[in-house]
Amino acid sequence: MTNRVVVTVEGGVVQSVVADRPDELDVVVLDYDTQGADEDRIEYITQPDGSKSDAVVIPIETEHPRISLDEVFGKASATVT
């Protein structure tokens, strides 16, 4: 069975990550918008062309869903054309 994952975003910020089996996931947000970030939080991430880009790497704890993933994925599959 596929491990379904829902990422909730509000105001451009990840609010939560929920999954059928959250213990099977490791999730990070890679945020290239480093303006205002603490200098000690900024990492240098290698890009496909070999260059380095500043980014903030934010680990996200995955949770068991409190919403119906059947409903969410049902609505998502209805919008795929």
Image: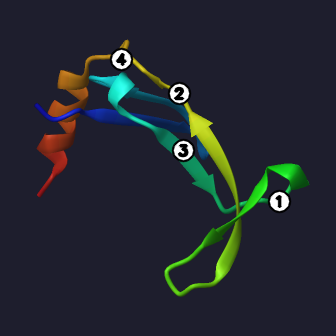
Measure the alpha-carbon separation of dots 4 and 2: 12 Å
In the visual, does 48 lie left or right of 75? right
Check whether the beta carbons of the residues at disc 4 and disc 1 lie within 8 A of each other. no
Other-residue count near label 4 (Cα within 10 Å), few / some / many at <14 / 14–19 / ≥20: some
Check whether the beta carbons of the residues at disc 1 and disc 3 lie within 8 A of each other. no
Q: Which residue is mark 1?
A: 35
Of mark 1 and mark 2, the one earlier in the sequence is 1
Q: Which residue is mark 3?
A: 28
Measure the alpha-carbon separation of dots 1 and 2: 24 Å
Measure the alpha-carbon separation of dots 4 and 3: 18 Å
Q: Is residue 12 shown above or below 17?
A: below
In the visual, does 14 lie left or right of 79? right
Other-residue count near label 2 (Cα within 10 Å), few / some / many at <14 / 14–19 / ≥20: some
Identify the disc placed on residue 62: none
Of mark 1 and mark 3, the one earlier in the sequence is 3
Q: Quadrant of the N terminus?
A: top left
Measure the alpha-carbon separation of dots 1 and 3: 19 Å
- Residue depicted at x 37% and y 16%: 64
Q: Which residue is mark 4?
A: 65
Of mark 4 and mark 3, the one earlier in the sequence is 3
Mark 4 against mark 3, which lies toward the viewer?
3
Residue 56 in the image: state x and y as whole percent. Answer: 71, 54
Mark 4 against mark 2, which lies toward the viewer?
2
Type of residue at label 2? Glu
Q: Is residue 7 shown above or below 55?
A: above
Residue positioned most to the top: 66
Residue 4 in the image: state x and y as whole percent. Answer: 24, 33
- Residue depicted at x 38% and y 34%: 25
